[in-house]
Amino acid sequence: MPVSTTIVSNPATVTGISDSTAISITGGDYKINGGSWTSSAGTVNNGDSVKVRQTSSASYSTMTTATLNIAALTERTMLQLRH
């Protein structure tokens, strides 16, 4: 993986919630249903499609982490560059 490269996840469909639920992220940003990228907290609904975006480290052998939180569920993606 090249340094300082933007990586975008595959879409994930939100399931198992019945009401609008809080969503937030650290270490990256996300978008819902093809909307704009954001790092601000928001809400997500059952059936929404969510993608996560993060940037790899500017240094080799350094891991970056993006953690997406939806209510009690957490999805973490990590990138480590090796030289």
Image (tube, helix red, strand yellow):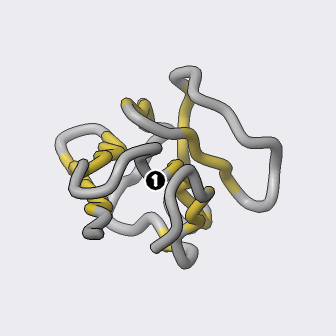
Of residues 2 and 50, the one nearer the viewer is 2
Image coordinates of residue 63 in percent, x first then y, are: 24, 51
Image coordinates of residue 77 in percent, x first then y, are: 30, 59
Q: Is residue 66 left or right of residue 35?
A: left
Picture residue at 28% right of the left edge, 38% below the top: 71
Looking at the rendered structure, the number of numbered marks drawn on it comes to: 1
Which residue type does callout 1 highlight? Ser
Image coordinates of residue 67 in percent, x first then y, are: 30, 43
Image height check: is 77 above or below 1? above
Q: Is residue 34 left or right of residue 10?
A: right
Residue sitting farthest toward the top: 40
Identify the secondary structure beneath mark 1: loop
According to the picture, the residue beneath numbered tag 1 turns out to be: 56
Picture residue at 46% right of the left edge, 53% below the top: 56
Image height check: is 23 above or below 44? above
Image coordinates of residue 43 in percent, x first then y, are: 54, 33
Image height check: is 39 above or below 59? above
Residue sitting farthest toward the right: 35
Q: Is residue 29 left or right of residue 62?
A: right
Picture residue at 59% right of the left edge, 58% below the top: 5
Quadrant the N terminus occupies: bottom left
Quadrant the C terminus occupies: bottom left
Few, some or many residues within 10 Å of mark 1 (<14, 14–19, 20+): many
Picture residue at 54% right of the left edge, 78% below the top: 10
